[in-house]
Image: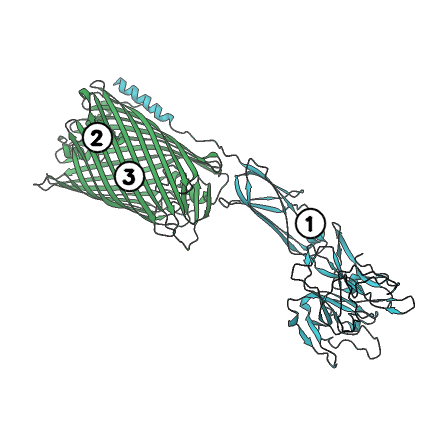
Amino acid sequence: MKTIKLVTIIAVMALSSLWGCKKRGNDVITATAVINVLYPVSYSPQNAENVEVKLVSKADGTETKVKTDAAGNANFSDLIPGFYDISVSKSLTAPEALALTGISSAITLNVIKNNVNIQPTMVNNVSLRLAGSAVGSLVIKEVYYTGSSTPSGGTYFSDQFVEIYNNSTDTIFLDNLCIADIFGVSGLINPSSVPTPFKDDQANVYANNVWRIPGTGKQRPLAPGKSILIAQDGVNHKEATLNPNSPVDLSAADWETFNERPDNRDADAPNVPNLEKLYFTGGFDWLMPVFGPSLVIFKIDNFNTLEKSAIPGSTLPERIKIPNSMIIDSFEALRDASSGSYKRIPAALDAGFVFATSTYTGESFIRKTSSTIGGRRVLQDTNNTTNDFIKLSTPKPKGF
Amino acid sequence: MKFIFKNKFWFSVCNLLFIAGLFPAMAQVNATDSTLLFQNGFNGNVWQQTKNLSLIKLDSIADYSSASFTFLQTQGSFKRPQQATKELLYGFASEGLKKYGNWHFYGNFSYQKLNNKEVAYSHVARPYDGNPFIWADTLAGDWLGDQLATSLQVSIPLKNNKWNTGLLLDYLTEQSARSADPKPLYRYRTILLKPFISYQLSQKHLFGVKFSYQNKNEVNEIGNFSTNNPQLYRLRGYGTFSQGPIVTAERLLKGSLLGAGLNYTYQASSSTLLYVDADYGFNTEDVTQGVSLPVFEGGLDETYANLYINFQKKLSRKGYQISALAYFRDGSGFDPVFDAYNPAFYFSGVNTNFSFWIKTNDKIMFGVKIEPQFSYLNYFDGIAKTDWFTSNLFTNASAFVNYTMNNKFSFNFSPNLGYNINLRKDIAIGRPTQLSEILVRPDYLFNSIAYLNYGLSASCLLKPQSANVSYQFKASIINTNPQDLQPNGKDFGDRQHINTSFSILF
């Protein structure tokens, strides 16, 4: 019996020792990762601070979120090794966008990188650049329409040009971009001059001539802060055979308007490509009114869908009716300060106008610079030519 | 704690139970009674617990044979997350114990239809067996299957009857498939071999050595067209998982278990016996995915140990038994994705049994059994930073009364009452995943709740006068009722177990 008791006691003690043991230990080695987030190239500063970076595990969908520091780095630690999808999204308010881009327009920026392998044995540094829709757009930067006088006191108007500028933060493709001048006199040019009969239609503009940059869609990139020059004639107008008093050499223009005629009255500069002539009611060449043109730039997939409108009370050829909604930018110049009633561009598109000292003065009008972001000029665009443009005594094609 | 075996103690118990005049005379236990005691777990426990057929001679079980039709239903929402809401097993079985000279044979065979309803997050046969690398998807469904199990045990005396050897062979095969797309299925098979050898040192002392080998194989397939756009979840621990869309996939589990053990029997007299059995072993299971290019998914390494002690005293009219089974299982899973051991579990516990039976006269025999069980569970997952444990004390008390009306009819009635108390519990989930709140926390809550178990079983035995066969009908119902609400205020619900069978005994 004693043996039984002893064995039983020992057995119970052995049983008791089996209780309460707990398993511990973690052999899994976790990983760290640094995700560096940058704003688009045209933004300044580049480092995106206080931006939420989200890592989603491909294995089980677990999300980990960290905000970037002042250097734009989101530091992740204790990550389970595996594949992750990284996503970053940042919504900028208008003031924030203004500080970064010079353009006061709210925008949402995003970037995604999928299937990123994060392992403890690797240096897990990933750099991502945010991207979003272009802030800002194309603007008419400079218009030289006055022409110049010749050494003999004559008039010379072939050296007109229009400069179009990419005021946005991204590359814009200029394929199929159209430029047009709008019907109507610039002021009381002669006693019979009356304001445009289309004045009451504030929803459309009526174009005399329409020219188009040819392309298939991605052939004509224009980088942010860059411009193209559209010349009436892409030649060096200072040449002795033309007008030594001309203030411009347009032989390096990007485009020229060439009106092919049987009598070859319009010269075709061999080194400057030609715009497509979509609609033309002018004379020898595309002559903008030296008293002041109204210009618009727009894009349309099929030009032929635009309506042609007869000029009320006139037998002149029809004009192209272009809805305001298509207009990207506009420029209005009139004869003088009192010619406001002759505005051709609806106020909704352009609330103001400019005027030169006179005709053939060699003066041009250039858009003001609003700010400079990372070396890129942001031009002022308040949809008011009066406020947005200044007069230059001498044009500065591709200059400021 | 110290067990004191004094006749005075048990005499006092008998006095409490035997109110004067209730039990005027006590009758001898016969073969039928032995079987009855065996069925109620009051006798033959040594053989049942250890599956060591050489010990059958110590249990004094008479030869028997039976063929049965069985029906088992478990139903209710109080369950572990990956269990079925309703489990149905029905089929037929047969078993028999036969002695030829000094040789003993035991065999059983069963075939059952399986019908498991509303099984969620489990495509495998045994989601709670221990292996954490299992398949699942988000679509709960009903599973239909078949199970075939057979066991053969033989005990053979050797030279001078001092040596005895034997073998146990268990074979189980099961297959099941879900009716809902993409119709996952499994085919599960285990083979267990347990050879043993024992030596009768003297009349009182018997020593034995045993070995265990089990081979486990499970095949899972998935890939039937589905419009539900299911995602296959590859569970890798307790919260850790990976998921991906299902096209077609195959999973293979191969496991092997090796163990060895010793046992000692001290037979103080023909009526007094002390039995001690210990075994220790290792279990490894590897899971691979794919057929043409198998990819290692994970492996389980587990050690286990059991210690069983049984003290029993059997007289001609009464007897008592005290037993305890202590166990632990310590497992950890190796995950090749992380090249590290990630999930781990530890189970341990002690199941004790205090039982007493008496045959008061030719007609009445009754018994009382109290079974306190202590258990400890711990689950750990390094990736999901899961660490939870719970320790519980469950005590079950049951009694049976058998009334023999005559040599043709007897009736058995057995009430049962149990209660589980949670002693300690804690859970931490440092990096929760989608499945932490679906599988991990609910499993912790289930294993930590206090609950009441109550039930009743009854059987009757018919023996036509001229036949050598008896007919037995048994039915039992047990209800498990949680004693607390879930943290969200919702009720756990109940769990009900219904077991019926019709047997032909011969």
Residue A84 — which label? none
Amino acid under disc 2: Val
Please say if A5 is above or below A312.
Answer: above
Give the number of marks: 3
* Residue at screen point 77% across, 67% down: A332
Q: Which residue is mark 1?
A: A41
Disc 3 sits on a residue from what chain? Answer: B
Q: Residue at x 84, y 77 (%)?
A: A190
Q: Are marks 2 and 3 on the same chain?
A: yes
- Which chain appears cyan? A
- Name the colour assigned to chain B in the rendering: green
User: Please, is residue A119 above or below residue A160 in the view?
Assistant: above
Separation of marks 2 and 3 at Cα, in angstroms: 18 Å
Q: Quadrant of the C terminus of chain B?
A: top left
Label 2 CA crowd tier, 10 Å (few <14, some 14–19, many 20+):
many
Q: Amino acid at mark 1?
A: Val
Instruction: For mark 2, give the secondary structure.
Output: strand
* Whole-number angstrom distance, CA of label 2 to CA of label 1: 83 Å
Q: The residue under label 3 is which amino acid type?
A: Leu
Say the numbered circle drawn on residue B172. Answer: 3
Whether labels 3 and 1 share one chain: no
Q: Which mark is residue B154?
A: 2
Relative to B223, is A83 on the left or the right? right
Q: CA distance from mark 3 to mark 1?
A: 68 Å
Q: Which residue of the protein is positioned furthest toward the right in this rendering?
A: A152
Camera-nearest residue between A27 and A150: A150
The relative height of residue A352 versus residue B84 in the rendered view (above or below) is: below
Chain at tag 1: A
